[in-house]
């Protein structure tokens, strides 16, 4: 990613080719589920919690990504609540937010800062 | 930091916290004590609990919200004593908390009249989720229900009884009519007849004198000597303010209950406020949520040094009772002094409307609407803002007859301070400013910016109209475009993609759009690509432009599992295939249910099991049923002339032929068809997007019907035509629809918006008025020739197949968060958490 990143632990999640372009996959990290997004249109990678806080469904990795006034976002497939991929803030007016994780790419491998 | 203690965590108590946090985060230490075990929930929509909503669906905010905002929340722990001299409260569990300011939002309890036998089993009140759970439990063995109270809450309770399956329910009202505080006797009569048509029995002017039975209720006796049998009773005869704590602490209370407050909502102790249904202002208890929210806002404003007074509240209300609109506004009963009342009554349709007009004919004083309350918002605004009425004031309920009406005149005439959202006190000026200055150009943006429409949601149509009106006034062209990324309507985009021969979403966005796309434009563009080129929807990177269901070729269900629907054309299936479905369901432990479209739905499949399930189904001769797609679902059929003694033609064979012709056709919305073998219409073809009914001479073709929330009958397009002509017309009709409808528009809505309606559609499809028929028929032939089963392609293509795993880095593991419950010997999804 393009912003400066500091993270204590970098977890090797998968290869870049494992993630569809402009889409997401779910990563298992210990007991956590992390949604990883390859926003190839912007040449950016994002990671968030996989659980949608609205109905507590493990589904964000299966959501569509896109932008809202240039802010990258993901829409939960269940009820189309949208969240900023940068800040985790809910963009559809609800009082909830999601956790985001830093991502870095090295030699075709995707690392998530946990 | 100033300590604020809130007693009560109902809707108003919660709203107070929300408003205070929003206006002054981190300025106060807030502690909340609630008597119920759940955080505040939406009591207004309580009856939806029985209609399938869970306690969490109704929740105002989860417990985590309080935590995130530093609010200490004690649930199941009501405050027992207030020590006013030391400014301390003590809770049931013995928690002692100091306060600088105390806010009492203790609400109300159900008023239970002292009728002998009221303590018997099977007698309930209707107030909390716990009450509902007790009711649901008892209702399993109850057959005849009764509700005491024919007011707003009583009728809500009657709806709950119907939802609980007790269809034989009596409503008993003491007054001479239903909803005596809101509507007049003519309106009440219409309401009564509509409710009786739904199976309720309504008794008015009835005074219950005894609830009889041994241990549990068996019957009810009335003062007029009559009686009814009932084994379940809900008392919903009014509310009683919860003021016992106030009385005990020596605060002033009203003679008939309620904590006395001044216009700042202060009680007789200047450090204690009371808001919501427990507060008595000017001899009145305000038993609606909107004034409660207003009171919360007044306390918040005054705490922050502002100056705002409560000046009473408009008690106008609109609600849907068991599907029937009922509204009253202003003074619904105004009479005398030259006041004119205009009323219209249509007993056949069950509509009653009354408006009361000032003696000079210029202003609207109030009114009643039953059966159709679409005009409520406009009338309420006209009334509240004293807008000058047109010369023929009856036009406001009848609509202008003859001459050109001025569309949008309703909202443009409103003054800036007209309250549009009464739940959140948002004025017209606030909304227009959010659009013109705040740059909000979607309803969602306005909701976020102003909170308008986030309460009951009733004002959203007006919010949208105001937004469009403001944008137009700014000279912005308002068009039905897909979203911020495409400045085109679906039809324009369809033509452009076709002309430019673009095959992928990403290319469409690069050539015709801007930005990165979103969940609003991706599915319609993906659908256009599929309609035009009929290529596999998961290839060429188009998979991530599909909505979740299309992306995984299955329907996502509660809990994150998927359902599987193999195609069963015309609903005809061999025993061998039935067994194959049963075996697959057993092997993968799937819940099975017959769908409305004559096929079998298998629920509860893990994402990673989908390819194997489909492998087995395809081996048994099945193919995708496209239940996940905006495309042809089923063509339902009756058994037809092969077996039925009335059947004129073979409806099953024709249905299969049609279903197989149009299977996989991607369209703006789902498509359903039906074929009936005679006029008895057992396939319900007239409720489908296209329906075909056998006649002595051939077939009648109907189009543009649908079921769903607004059912609409299909209209006759052509009569007595043969099979080939019927298919030719269908090819043209479907292609016309696919090419020109807006996203997510069913054929019925598409036709409703079409200028010229069915006559124009006939001219296009039958007489070739657009000269497009040859091209559309060729397009359809191309569709039929290039059709392939998506699931077959998915399981045979390794790079597609590998996407059907939950964890990309642990492909053999299933999602451990998925849980099931059991019901009637099958599994069901665990309820929303």
Image (tube, coloured by chain):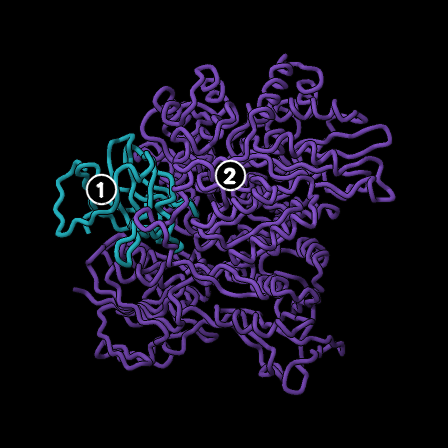
Chain colours: A cyan, B purple
Among all residues in the image, which is located at the extreme bottom? Answer: B214
Q: Given this view, does label 1 or label 2 mark the residue nearer the observer? A: 2
Q: Quadrant of residue A69?
A: top left
Q: Residues within 10 Å of mark 1 (few under 14, many from 20)?
A: many
| Mark 2 neighbour class, 10 Å CA radius: few under 14, some 14 to 19, many 20 or more | many
Q: Is residue B90 above or below residue B193?
A: below
Residue placed farthest to the front in the image? B619
> Which residue is under mark 1?
A110
Q: Nearer the viewer, residue B380 or B572?
A: B572
Q: Quadrant of residue B501?
A: top left
In the depicted view, which residue is nearer to us: B625 or B611? B611
User: Residue lying furthest top in this view?
Assistant: B771
Pick whichever, B743 or B318, lies toward us: B743
The residue indicated by pointer 2 is B791
x and y, in percent, of residue A82 in the image: 35, 43
**Tag 2's secondary structure?**
helix
- B406 in relation to B138, above or below: above
Identify the residue at horizontal 28%, vertical 82% (top origin).
Answer: B94
Residue B642 badge: none
**Quick check: can you spot residue B404?**
no
In the rendered view of the protein, which quadrant contains the N terminus of chain B? bottom left
Position of the C terminus of chain B, as image quadrant, is: bottom left
């Amino acid at each position: 990613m393009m912003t400066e990143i500091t993270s204590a632990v970098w977890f090797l999640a998968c290869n870049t080719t494992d993630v569809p372009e402009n889409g997401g996959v779910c990563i298992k990290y210990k007991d956590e589920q992390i949604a990883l997004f390859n926003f190839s249109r912007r040449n950016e990678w994002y990671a968030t919690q996989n659980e949608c806080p609205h109905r507590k469904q493990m589904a964000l990795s299966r959501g569509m990504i896109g932008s809202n006034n240039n802010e990258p976002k993901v829409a939960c497939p269940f009820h189309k609540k949208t969240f900023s991929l940068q800040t985790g803030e809910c963009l559809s007016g609800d009082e909830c937010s999601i956790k985001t994780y830093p991502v870095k790419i090295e030699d075709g491998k995707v690392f998530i800062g946990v | 930091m100033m300590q604020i203690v809130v007693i009560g965590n109902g809707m108003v108590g919660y709203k107070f916290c929300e408003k205070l946090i929003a206006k002054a985060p981190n300025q106060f230490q807030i502690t909340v004590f609630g008597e119920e075990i759940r955080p505040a929930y939406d009591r207004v929509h309580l009856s939806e609990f029985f209609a399938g909503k869970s306690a969490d669906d109704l929740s105002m905010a989860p417990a985590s919200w309080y935590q995130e905002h530093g609010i200490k929340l004690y649930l199941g722990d009501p405050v027992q004593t207030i020590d006013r001299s030391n400014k301390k409260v003590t809770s049931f569990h013995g928690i002692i908390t100091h306060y600088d300011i105390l806010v009492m939002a203790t609400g109300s309890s159900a008023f239970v009249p002292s009728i002998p036998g009221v303590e018997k089993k099977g007698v309930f009140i209707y107030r909390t989720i716990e009450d509902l759970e007790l009711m649901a439990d008892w209702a399993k063995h109850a057959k005849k229900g009764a509700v005491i109270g024919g007011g707003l809450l009583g009728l809500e309770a009657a709806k709950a009884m119907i939802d609980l399956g007790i269809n034989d329910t009596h409503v008993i009202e003491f007054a001479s009519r239903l909803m005596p505080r809101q509507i007049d006797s003519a309106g009440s009569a219409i309401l009564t007849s509509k409710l009786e048509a739904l199976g309720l029995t309504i008794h008015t002017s009835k005074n219950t004198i005894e609830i009889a039975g041994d241990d549990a209720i068996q019957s009810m006796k009335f003062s007029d000597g009559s009686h009814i049998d009932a084994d379940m009773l809900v008392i919903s005869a009014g509310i009683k303010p919860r003021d016992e704590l106030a009385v005990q602490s020596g605060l002033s209370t009203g003679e008939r209950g309620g904590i006395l407050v001044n216009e700042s909502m202060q009680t007789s102790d200047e450090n204690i406020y009371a808001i919501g249904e427990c507060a008595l202002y000017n001899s009145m208890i305000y038993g609606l949520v909107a004034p409660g929210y207003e009171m919360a806002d007044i306390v918040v404003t005054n705490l922050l040094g502002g100056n705002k007074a409560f000046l009473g509240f408009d008690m106008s209300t609109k609600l849907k009772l068991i599907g029937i609109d009922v509204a009253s506004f202003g003074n619904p009963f105004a009479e005398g002094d030259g006041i004119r009342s205009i009323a219209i009554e249509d007993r056949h349709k069950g509509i009653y409307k009354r408006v009361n007009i000032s003696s000079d004919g210029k202003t609207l004083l109030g009114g009643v609407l039953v059966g159709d309350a679409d005009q409520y918002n406009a009338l309420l605004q006209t009334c509240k803002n004293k807008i000058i009425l047109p010369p023929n004031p009856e036009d406001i309920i009848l609509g202008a007859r003859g001459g050109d009406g001025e569309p949008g005149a309703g909202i443009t005439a409103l003054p800036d301070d007209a309250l549009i959202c009464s739940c959140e006190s948002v004025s017209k000026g606030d909304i227009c400013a959010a659009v013109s200055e705040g740059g909000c150009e979607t309803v969602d943006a306005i909701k976020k910016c102003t909170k308008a429409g986030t309460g009951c949601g009733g004002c959203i149509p007006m919010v949208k109209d105001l937004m469009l009106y403001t944008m137009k006034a700014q000279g912005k062209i308002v068009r039905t475009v897909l979203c911020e990324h495409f400045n085109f309507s679906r039809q324009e985009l369809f033509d452009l993609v076709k002309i430019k021969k673009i095959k992928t979403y990403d290319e469409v966005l690069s050539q015709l759009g801007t930005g990165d796309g979103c969940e609003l434009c991706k599915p319609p563009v993906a659908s256009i690509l599929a309609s035009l080129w009929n290529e596999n929807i998961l290839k060429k990177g188009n998979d991530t432009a599909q909505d979740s269901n299309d992306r995984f070729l299955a329907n996502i269900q509660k809990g994150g599992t998927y359902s599987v629907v193999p195609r069963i054309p015309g609903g005809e299936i061999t025993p061998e295939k039935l067994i194959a479905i049963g075996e697959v369901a057993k092997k993968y432990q799937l819940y099975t249910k017959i769908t409305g479209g004559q096929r079998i739905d298998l629920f509860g499949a893990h994402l990673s099991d989908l390819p194997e399930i489909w492998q087995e189904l395809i081996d048994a001769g099945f193919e995708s049923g496209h239940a996940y797609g905006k495309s042809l679902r089923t063509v339902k059929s009756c058994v037809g002339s092969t077996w039925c003694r009335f059947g004129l033609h073979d409806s099953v064979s024709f249905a299969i032929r049609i279903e197989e012709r149009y299977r996989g056709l991607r369209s703006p919305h789902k498509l359903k068809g039906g074929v009936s073998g005679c006029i008895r219409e057992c396939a319900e073809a007239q409720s489908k997007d296209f329906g075909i009914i056998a006649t002595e001479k051939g077939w009648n073709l109907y189009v543009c019907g649908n079921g769903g929330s607004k059912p609409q009958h299909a209209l006759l397009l052509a009569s007595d035509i043969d099979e080939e002509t019927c298919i030719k017309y269908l090819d043209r009709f479907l292609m016309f629809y696919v090419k020109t409808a807006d996203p997510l528009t069913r054929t019925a809505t598409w036709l409703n918006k079409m200028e010229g309606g069915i006559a124009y559609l006939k001219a296009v499809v039958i007489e070739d008025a657009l000269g497009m028929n040859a091209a559309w028929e060729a397009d359809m032939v191309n569709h039929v020739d290039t059709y392939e089963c998506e699931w077959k392609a998915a399981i045979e293509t390794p790079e597609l197949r590998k996407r059907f795993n939950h964890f990309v880095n642990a492909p053999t593991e299933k999602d451990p968060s998925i849980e099931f419950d059991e019901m009637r010997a099958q599994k069901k999804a665990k309820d929303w958490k």
